[in-house]
Image (cartoon, grey):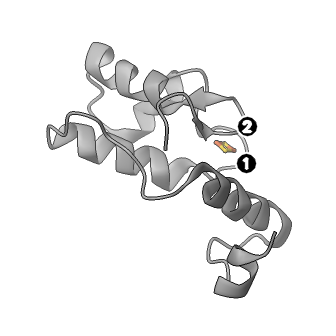
């Protein structure tokens, strides 16, 4: 994902904002990322991904990222909001 793409789509919190928050505030637990513009406090979709960013930062990775394109990430989040499930079938994932 690009640095300015939003990991928390509810509150429009970008990957860049989250990584900078980690660098500056040095959170002790992943849940502290909610203090970065409310990330993760809306629909809840991004919570596991905030944790992934936090864990990568904790391991010292220079540029924590997620293994999705923005389109895929947003489609998965829509699925989650509609169905309440995090796992999206492959055929729906590829549908436009
Ligand atoms: S996408 Fe972050 S709380 Fe909804």
Question: Which disc, if any, is residue 87?
Answer: none
Nearer the observer, disc 1 or disc 2?
Answer: 2
Instruction: Answer with the quadrant where ligand 1 appears in the image.
Output: top right
Position of residue 16 relative to residue 80, above or below, is above
Q: Secondary structure at mark 1?
A: loop
Looking at the image, residue 60 sits to the left or right of residue 20; the answer is left
Q: Is residue 84 above or below residue 67?
A: below
Circle 2 Cα neighbour tier, 10 Å, few/some/many (<14 / 14–19 / ≥20): some
* Near-viewer residue (62 or 23): 62
Which residue carries the number 1 mark? 43
For this orientation, the residue located farthest to the left is: 60
Residue 96 picture quarter: bottom right
Q: Residues within 10 Å of mark 1 (few under 14, many from 20)?
A: some
Mark 1 vs ligand 1: CB under 8 Å? Answer: yes
Q: From the Cβ of disc 2, is ligand 1 less than 8 Å away? A: yes
**53 with respect to 95 (left or right):** left
Q: Residue at x 73, y 65 (%)?
A: 80
User: Which residue is found at the position 73% from the left and 48% from the top?
Assistant: 43
| Marks 1,2: beta carbons within 8 A | yes
Q: Would you place residue 38 above or below residue 67 in this image?
A: above
The foreground one among 76 and 27 is 76
Q: Position of residue 90 (x, y in %)?
A: 64, 84
Question: Which residue appears at 47% of the width and 51% of the height?
Answer: 49
Q: Secondary structure at mark 2?
A: loop
Q: Position of residue 26 (x, y in %)?
A: 26, 22
Q: Residue 60 lies in what quarter of the image? A: top left
Of callouts 1 and 2, the N-terminal one:
2
Residue highlighted by disc 2: 10
């Amino acid at each position: 994902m690009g640095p300015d793409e939003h990991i928390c789509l509810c509150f429009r919190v970008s990957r860049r904002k989250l990584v900078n928050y980690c660098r500056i505030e040095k959170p002790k637990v992943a849940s502290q990322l909610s203090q970065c513009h409310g990330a993760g406090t809306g629909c809840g979709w991004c919570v596991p991904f905030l944790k992934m960013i936090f864990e990568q930062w904790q391991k010292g990775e220079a540029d924590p990222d997620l293994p999705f394109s923005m389109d895929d990430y947003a489609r998965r989040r829509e699925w989650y909001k509609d169905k309440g499930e995090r796992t999206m079938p492959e055929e729906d994932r590829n549908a436009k």
